[in-house]
Amino acid sequence: MFTFPQFNPVVISLGPLSIHWYGVMYIIAFGGAWVLASYRRNMKPNQWSTDQISDLIFYGAIGAVVGGRLGSVFFYNFDRFLEDPLWVFRVWEGGMSFHGGLLGVGVALYFYSKSLRKGFWETIDFIVPFVPFGLGAGRIGNFIGGELWGRPTDVPWGMVFPHVDQLPRHPSQLYEVALEGVALFILLWWFSSNPRPRLAVSGVFALGYGSFRFFIEFFREPDQQIGFIAFEWLTMGQLLSVPMAAGGILLLFLSYNKQKNPPAF
């Protein structure tokens, strides 16, 4: 059994300015995505310019932050929003949703793709292999912040989170780093390294993330303000992941059943 090390959430303080680990992880996430996208762009330099890559990451970051916040509000904290609508702007109090962030990125990149006169799915197929890197960084931020802990367990690697209780719990944040971050990144990087029909890379991402998240939710403590949605085991994270995984299967079906479907990149 282990004990959560109680990290200081503040990396450094400079007078009234405090830099938190979670903010650092966002910088690492988007910075790493830019590096990976630039590397992949060098393999096909005629399809994406350096400026387009920078803009792609910028608009994706805006969509992720705005969508992630709105997703947290409407998927997980709607009652709190009704009581205090201004809470949506108090981002320093925490609260981000991956599924909301994904929708936000989709909207942002749809309009950016239109401005470039590129196909939406061409853009999405290009960008999704880099998303797991950011997911892994974000989950490390969750762990450092001591949030999104797991359910009680008796496994040898169970971890006590003293700010929660004295029960050993699954370090579910680290499970998410391993599956949503490392495993999904390796799978997508390998799969997208060779020409694939359009929609295929996006389909693997949606199916992979939806499946991994659905599985991990069995070890993660349900959100206190919501609890279980149904059957005394279905969580909001699982409810949102089912259509995502199903959408991934649909994208793969469409991808490999279109005879004239050109490679994504």
Image (cartoon, rainbow, N blue to C red):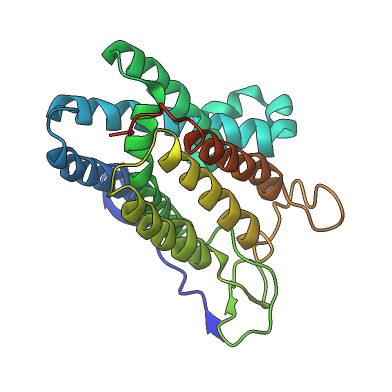
Residue lying farthest front?
A: 259
Q: Nearer the viewer, residue 220 or 37?
A: 37
**In this rendering, position of residue 55 left or right of residue 132:** left
Q: Picture coordinates of residue 149 (x, y %)?
A: 60, 63
Instruction: Report if residue 124 is visible in the image.
Output: yes
Instruction: Tell me where residue 190 appears, x and y as whole percent.
Output: 32, 56
Residue 95 appears in view = no
Q: Is residue 187 left or right of residue 213?
A: left
Figure quadrant of residue 105: top left
User: Which is more toward the observer, 74 or 6?
Assistant: 74
Which part of the image, by quadrant, shows the N terminus?
bottom right
- At 53% across and 33% down in the image, what residue appears? 254
Residue plotted at (59% across, 73% down): 162
Indicate left or right for 264 with 149 as reference. left
- Label count reads 0
Residue 46: give x, y in percent of width and height. 13, 28
Q: Quadrant of residue 212?
A: bottom right
Residue located at (53% from left, 80% from top): 3
Q: Is residue 233 above or below residue 261?
A: below
**Residue 183's spot in the image, x, y percent?**
42, 62
Note whether 206 is above or below 215 in the view shown: above
- At x 47% / y 46%, what residue is drawn? 205
Choose between 72 and 60: the one closer to the eye: 60
Tell me the quarter of the picture where residue 242 sits: top right
Judge whether 262 appears above or below 96 on screen.
Answer: above
- Please identify the quadrant where the C terminus is shown: top left
